[in-house]
Amino acid sequence: MKMAALSMPSEHEAIQMAAHLTSFCQKGGFMLSKWICNSRAVLTSIPQEHGVKETRELDLDKDNLPMERALGLHWCVEADVFKFRIVQERPYTRQGNLSIDGSMYDLLSKSHILTDLL
């Protein structure tokens, strides 16, 4: 599995889910790694060596959580919001606009591409 996105109703349930998933995968010889969460309590419960590289050296009591990238979206972990960031300049042509549209993949169809970008 390359990536999983889970949402839990409480921090306590998220901590339990992380422990159960880790234990279950270890029984099969797999190690879950690169954990990231917008809850500092959940991040604290996960061993640092299993977290994403950006969180390993953070002081979770005072440092801001990092920005993560997935499926063409940027997730601001601290604010728990998704952001679009167009990195490359594209010509304002039909092909350039389609290229920009394709770079903003929306897996759950929960957000709308801003027509102002085109």
Image (cartoon, grey):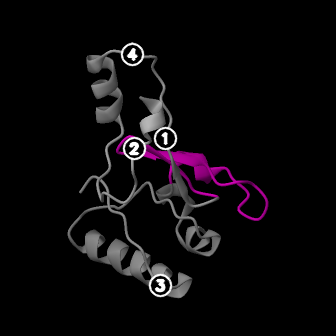
Per the image, label 4 sits on a secondary structure element best described as loop
State the quadrant of the C terminus: top left
Query: For the residue marked with disc 2, what is the amino acid?
Result: Ile
Between residue 79 and residue 90, name the one nearer to us: 90
The reply to whether callout 1 and callout 2 are in contact (CB within 8 Å) is: yes
Q: Residue at x 39, y 12 (%)?
A: 91
What residue did someone put label 1 on? 84
Q: Nearer the viewer, residue 38 or 45?
A: 38
Task: Say whether residue 7 is left or right of residue 37.
Answer: left
Q: Which residue is mark 2?
A: 113
**Sequence order check, earlier mark of 4 and 3:** 3
Where disc 2 sits, the SS reads: loop
Sequence-earlier tag: 4 or 2: 4
Residue that badge 4 annotates: 92
| Residue 86 placement (x, y as % from top left) | 47, 29
Task: Tell me the magenta residue range.
Answer: 52-78
Disc 4 from disc 3: Cα separation: 43 Å
